[in-house]
Amino acid sequence: MRPLAQSTPEQFITDFFTTFHEQVVRGDHDPAPAMARFYTPDILMVSDGIPLDWDKLLAHIRPVRKNLAPDDEARFEVHEAIADGDRIAARLTIHAATRKKRVTTEVVAFYTFTPDGRMAESHGCTRIVTEASTTPEAESERRE
């Protein structure tokens, strides 16, 4: 990974997740060695209150790999990101497709990175976006 200092926070997060997806999630090899290029061995990722260390994150990736559509067209849309030293706060949307359906997930998270661009810590919340929650009527109701 390219160090954070060589990019904008938005581009860094986009590149991080896009490259991770291509090299680890979509790869046809053992994901563990490739994952080491993106995460520190002592990674702590807390998502929706559920903590994942290295082993749990690796275990999570394996079924994701199996369930992705052959061409999942994954896309990481970073809406905003702010960096402070080695930390980034970001709001993004993940678009992908499983073998059964398209999936859109909104993410708000705080990330900590090492100088070489690997993630050391992540704390965030996610929300699965349903078709009904993206209609103009739903957006209007949410704002009221």
Image (cartoon, rainbow, N blue to C red):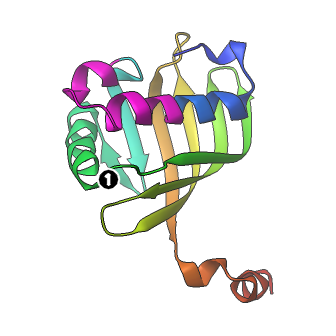
Query: Which residue in the protein does label 1 denote?
Result: 68
Query: Magenta residues, as a range?
Result: 17-36
Residue 27 is a magenta residue: yes
How many marks the image carries: the answer is 1
In the image, residue 56 above or below residue 126: above
Residue 72 is a magenta residue: no
Question: x, y (%) of residue 26?
Answer: 34, 37
- For the point 23% across and 41% down, the residue is 56
Q: Residues within 10 Å of mark 1 (few under 14, many from 20)?
A: many
Q: Is residue 77 left or right of residue 96?
A: right
Question: x, y (%) of residue 126?
Answer: 50, 59
Q: Main secondary structure of the magenta part?
A: helix
Question: x, y (%) of residue 78?
Answer: 67, 45
- For the point 42% across and 23% down, the residue is 38
Q: Is residue 65 left or right of residue 91?
A: left
- For the point 44% across and 66% down, the residue is 102
Residue type marked 1: Leu
In the image, residue 116 above or below residue 60: above
Q: Is residue 93 left or right of residue 83?
A: left
- For the point 68% across and 82% down, the residue is 135
In the image, residue 16 above or below residue 80: above
Quarter of the rendering occupied by the C terminus: bottom right
Q: Secondary structure at mark 1?
A: loop
Question: x, y (%) of residue 63?
Answer: 21, 50
